[in-house]
Image (cartoon, rainbow, N blue to C red):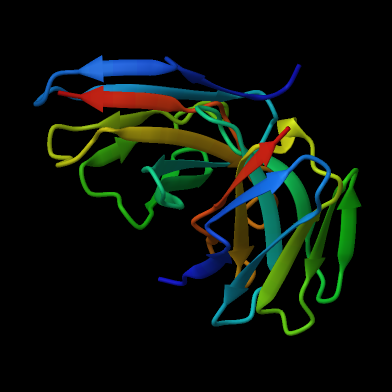
Amino acid sequence: GQQLNQSPQSMFIQEGEDVSMNCTSSSIFNTWLWYKQDPGEGPVLLIALYKAGELTSNGRLTAQFGITRKDSFLNISASIPSDVGIYFCAGRETSGSRLTFGEGTQLTVNP
Amino acid sequence: DGGITQSPKYLFRKEGQNVTLSCEQNLNHDAMYWYRQDPGQGLRLIYYSQIVNDFQKGDIAEGYSVSREKKESFPLTVTSAQKNPTAFYLCASSMARDYEQYFGPGTRLTVT
């Protein structure tokens, strides 16, 4: 089935730094979702994107739906220790199709 | 306080036994999903249901079964036919098929 390439796989940063991660697809998507998962917990929805070029913020998080419709980006500004976790992207090709998940970006923030 | 509950949080079973994982939602969502998560991997879809008394296989349905007798409930049975059942199981729901999915806290199943 459809696969998403999420990068980087892991990031080690200092508190206060900005973070960027992205997902790419070989086909066009009409929906991009970004989730955060804490250890041993279920993923929590951070941002949902439905239009090419859309830029949406949620506090220090900003996500963009790429204009080619084959990629999406998540930025975290001024990272803090509680940003630690795994960030997943998920995308949907067309109406009625399944969500496909990336393999996640493990973020570590050093105080 | 609306949400999705999964129970139990941790489950231990002997090989050869069937086990049922519970998933309940009070969000009035029509669609529900079961995913499996293994270390270092993304989520893989086991089964999903868009309406009561109807469900479809996902990408890795072999060795699993589900039922959807009530809108609020979507239990997953891991049968003895599932060759590698030890994993973290996540239940999710959405208002309808094309809407955002919201996840429960997960059940970690260990089979020895």
Residue in the image at 67% along x and 74% along y: A71
Query: In the image, residue A57 lies at what x, y percent?
Result: 89, 53
Along the viewing direction, whichever of A6 and A79 lies nearer the viewer: A79
Query: A78 above or below A48?
Result: above
Residue in the image at 90% along x and 43% along y: A59
Which residue lies most toward the left here? B16
Query: In the image, residue A70 lies at what x, y percent?
Result: 65, 79
User: Toward which corner of the image does residue B53 lie, by quadrant?
Assistant: top left
Q: Is residue B30 visible?
A: no
Q: How many marks?
A: 0
Query: A19 above or below B85?
Result: below
Query: In the image, residue A42 lies at what x, y percent?
Result: 56, 33
Query: B39 above or below B5?
Result: below
**Quadrant in which the N terminus of chain A appears:** bottom left
Residue in the image at 50% along x and 35% along y: B91
> With A44 as the anchor, is B8 left or right in this view?
left
**Quadrant in which the C terminus of chain A appears:** top right
Query: In the image, residue B23 lies at what x, y percent?
Result: 49, 25
Residue in the image at 11% along x and 25% along y: B15
Along the viewing direction, whichever of A58 and A8 lies nearer the viewer: A8
